[in-house]
Amino acid sequence: MPKLSLVERDAFLSETPGFIMDIATLDADGAPHLCPIWFLLEEGRIWFTPRQHSEWLKHLRRDPRVALCIDEPSVPYRKVLVRGRAEIVHEIGQDDLWRDRYRRIAGRYLPSTDANAYVDGTDDQPRALCAVTLESAEVKTWRMPVEGESYDGIWAKRYWTDDAKVRQAAPDVFNKSTD
């Protein structure tokens, strides 16, 4: 299946307006907890801001393991999946130290004046600033094949059954090493 190059991945993660990121954390019982949030890619890290009373911030304090999913709802259906550890870079109450980053996060999802009004209108509600460093995480990407690429790349070869039509159309592709 086609993967995004690092340049394509970072361009996708930086698009404006931004795609929503789903963050999965583990609750006290070990069950997954999923929350859609805003994010920003800077300095090789995905940055995000839980509010002080967020359930998932409590989860991160106990167990920093996360899964992140950023995907788009239309062709070419790009997606980035990340499994790693979130770091609480700035604790609650230190918002003034990173307010400009928060403006950049909001600015990916709202027009500039609205983003500034949103940040200024909620700056009395403390947040933490967290990040996942992509270099130390497991990162997987995918997209649909584009014009000129073989459709057999839509799925990893291990998913195709022996009698799949696509195998018959491109037998030489399936006789090579599998991914």
Image: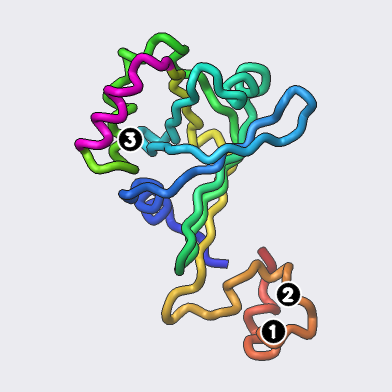
User: What segment carries the magenta color?
Assistant: 113-126
Is 123 magenta? The answer is yes
Numbered disc 3: secondary structure:
helix
Q: Identity of the amino acid at label 2? A: Trp
Per the model, the C-alpha gap separating discs 2 and 3 is 42 Å
Tell me: residue 163, above or below residue 25: below
Q: Residue beneath label 2, please? A: 160
Report the quarter where the N terminus lies: bottom right
Q: Position of residue 53 (x, y in %)?
A: 55, 18
Residue highlighted by disc 3: 106
**Mark pair 1, 3: CA separation:** 46 Å
Looking at the image, is mark 2 or mark 3 earlier in the sequence? 3
* Magenta segment includes 124: yes
Q: Which residue is label 1 attached to? A: 167
Residue 88: image x %, image y %? Answer: 50, 19
Residue beneath the point at 44% across and 35% down: 46
